[in-house]
């Protein structure tokens, strides 16, 4: 455990909790967490996850704009349904992206876990996009991705980060339940 990992975990936890609560402060905190994890993943050679943090930064800016714009008169963020065709398209894009990233990182880098890292990174981008678009199904994808991330981070010795991702599974369950109630 390094001070960098501790700071990244604490910031991420607060940011995810605020996301589940549909609080706009989640976006700047998520941006800080991305920067911290970018450096951490660089240090442990999880390059796909490092690049993922940079892409998350772009997605966070996009989500911040969308969430600020699409709110009820009360100021609450509107939750939107995810159509089946868009869900299928997103999952297909996640798979194809993971294959492309995995192929590249397995051949051109010294990545520690190129295929697993690539798939998790690619599907995380889909989940991030769905979160920015305010789809409650994003939480289900986050749960699936985070379960696998826990194992990968334990394998890499990032125990505190693995613990964060285990807690994030619980936060994703909470987020899904809250967003599901809002849709009703």
Image: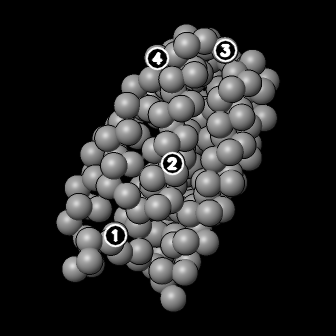
**With respect to residue 132, does 164 lie above or below?**
above
**What's the mark number on residue 1?**
3
| Few, some or many residues within 10 Å of mark 3 (<14, 14–19, 20+) | few
Mark 2 or 3, nearer chain start: 3
| Residue at numbered disc 4 | 39
Residue 154 shown left or right of residue 74 in the figure? right
Tell me the residue at 68%/54% (across/down).
170
Q: Are marks 2 and 4 in contact (CB under 8 Å)?
A: no
Helix, strand or loop status at disc 4: helix
| Residue at numbered disc 2 | 16
Helix, strand or loop status at disc 2: helix
Mark 2 or 4, nearer chain start: 2
Q: Are marks 4 and 1 in contact (CB under 8 Å)?
A: no
Tell me the residue at 51%/37% (across/down).
12
- Which numbered mark, 4 or 1, is in the foreground of this view? 1
| Residue at numbered disc 1 | 77
Q: Nearer the viewer, residue 21 or 27?
A: 21
């Amino acid at each position: 455990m390094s001070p960098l990992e501790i700071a990244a975990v604490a910031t991420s936890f607060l940011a995810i909790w605020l996301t589940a609560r549909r609080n706009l402060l989640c976006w700047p905190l998520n941006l800080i967490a991305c920067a911290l994890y970018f450096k951490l993943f660089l240090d442990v050679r999880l390059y796909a996850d490092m690049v993922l943090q940079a892409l998350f930064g772009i997605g966070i800016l996009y989500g911040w704009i969308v969430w600020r714009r699409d709110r009820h008169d009360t100021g609450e963020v509107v939750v939107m349904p995810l159509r089946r065709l868009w869900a299928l398209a997103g999952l297909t894009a996640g798979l194809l992206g993971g294959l492309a990233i995995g192929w590249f990182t397995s051949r051109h880098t010294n990545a520690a876990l190129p295929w697993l890292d690539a798939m998790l990174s690619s599907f995380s981008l889909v989940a991030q996009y769905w979160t920015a678009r305010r789809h409650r199904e994003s939480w289900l994808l986050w749960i699936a991705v985070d379960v696998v991330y826990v194992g990968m981070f334990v394998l890499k010795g990032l125990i505190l980060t693995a613990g964060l991702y285990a807690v994030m599974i619980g936060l994703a369950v909470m987020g899904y339940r809250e967003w599901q109630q809002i849709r009703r």
